Image (tube, coloured by chain):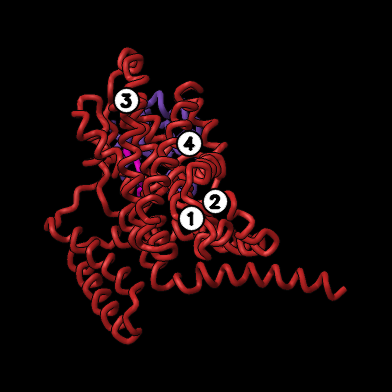
Amino acid sequence: MKIEIMGTGCAKCKKLFQQATEAVKEMGIEAELIKVEDLQAMMDLGVMITPALYINGEAVSAGRVPGKEEIKRMLTEAGKQ
Amino acid sequence: MIQTSNILFDSLNSGLMAVLDYLAQHVVTCLIPAFFIAGAIAALVKKDAILKYFGPQVRKFKSYSVASVSGTILAVCSCTILPLFAGIYKKGSGIGPATTFLFAGPAINVLAIIYTAQVLGMDLGIARAFFAIAMSILIGLIMAYLFGKEQAANQPPFKTMPTFEEEVERPRWVIPVFFVLLVGILIFGASQLDWATKLAIVYLLTMAVAVLLIYYFKKEEVTEWGIETWDLTKKIFPILVIGTFFVGVFAFFVPPETFRPFLGDNGLGANLLASILGAVLYMPTLLEVPIIGTTFGYTTGVMASGPALALLLSGPTTSLPSIVVLTRIMGWKKTLTYWGLSVTMATLAGLSYGYVIG
């Protein structure tokens, strides 16, 4: 599972990365966690409002920091597909 | 010996006075409610409805008007301004609405408008909001006129980016009433009524908010509101305190009077200078208020209204560091044009405002 956190480096983006990392650890799943801070990369993907969370290349959240429980739910959903 | 320690003591005292002036008086009545309002916007206002208006197929009138005011709602966290700008420019409505958003978004930041109105005066606060919106649309239209055609050719397919917020079942009046109550707390808290009346009114309004929260909001939403508010406070307040302290210290060594010949009138030179200063200097959120009030002496009548407004308009949108990023997004030709336009429009706004206010 590939998890990408898009953000230009502000507190919210860092918090999202931290919560995603913890969610992955607590669920014990295999996942690659990437923090994307490059504006060009974000533009290419069409990211408009940061922070944004992508799982396996699909956007699952944008413009906010979902709670850990919500992130876990999203991970479970993605795992099923 | 005595001389040096006097200077040290006096300059530090000046710093402390500045902090007291700009913060102590205003923290409870203005800043705390303002941070809660900003946090509520960030946490509770659904952004999807607004992002829809940035698509390439949206009618011009709608995309420009939404672009000019949406900064209040979308850009509570200033870090999202550049990504949003890039998104609207590359994949959405194009360079016109994108630059409209780029100019207005940072200038009509909720916290900044509230704090400006409270500390520097309602007239300047309202002028800031009004001119930010008006000038941003002008800038967007000019940019679209100059660069619009080459943009249309390069338009890649548009992918709407939803925010995936969970739908909450709630009567439609709840959120508007909620915000009216919060704004009411702010207005009454900051008003000139005697403190007993103020306390009673604010208390009642707070109770009303609590009732709304208990019956119409999910626990996670309230928690998210708290988190957003605290995050904003952590991000902005410490720098504001420290920055204001140094503004005070600086003013001890370079008193605002120094700037009177440069910024003390409403003429073209003063307004232009103020615009350029704003366009180049990086000023952390809210710090532009003490800088205008004390450093340049607006509150002591040294800096004139026009230049003050010009600085308030050109300050937030660009700074030397952000110009570098903009160049990477839209190239140096468009970036320099935008920069020039923001300076020009801020100057014009300052000139008109200064002329009217006198």
- In terms of depth relative to the viewer, which is nearer, B321 or A81? B321
User: What mark, if any, has residue A33 been given in the picture?
Assistant: 4
Task: Give the CA separation, mark 1 to mark 2.
Answer: 6 Å
Mark sitting earlier along the chain (1/3): 3
Local crowd size for mark 4, using a 10 Å CA cut-off: few (<14), some (14–19), many (≥20): some
Q: Position of residue B153 (x, y in %)?
A: 32, 12
Task: Give the CA separation, mark 2 to mark 4.
Answer: 51 Å
Task: Give the CA separation, mark 4 to mark 1.
Answer: 52 Å
In this structure image, what is the colour of chain B? Answer: red
Instruction: Report the mark closest to the observer, 2 or 3.
Output: 2
The residue indicated by pointer 2 is: B263
- In terms of depth relative to the viewer, which is nearer, B101 or A71? B101
Q: Position of residue B262 (x, y in %)?
A: 58, 49
Name the image quarter holding the N terminus of chain B.
Answer: bottom right
Compared with B82, B352 (above or below) is below
Mark sitting earlier along the chain (1/2): 2
Instruction: Report the mark closest to the observer, 4 or 1.
Output: 1
In this structure image, what is the colour of chain A? Answer: purple
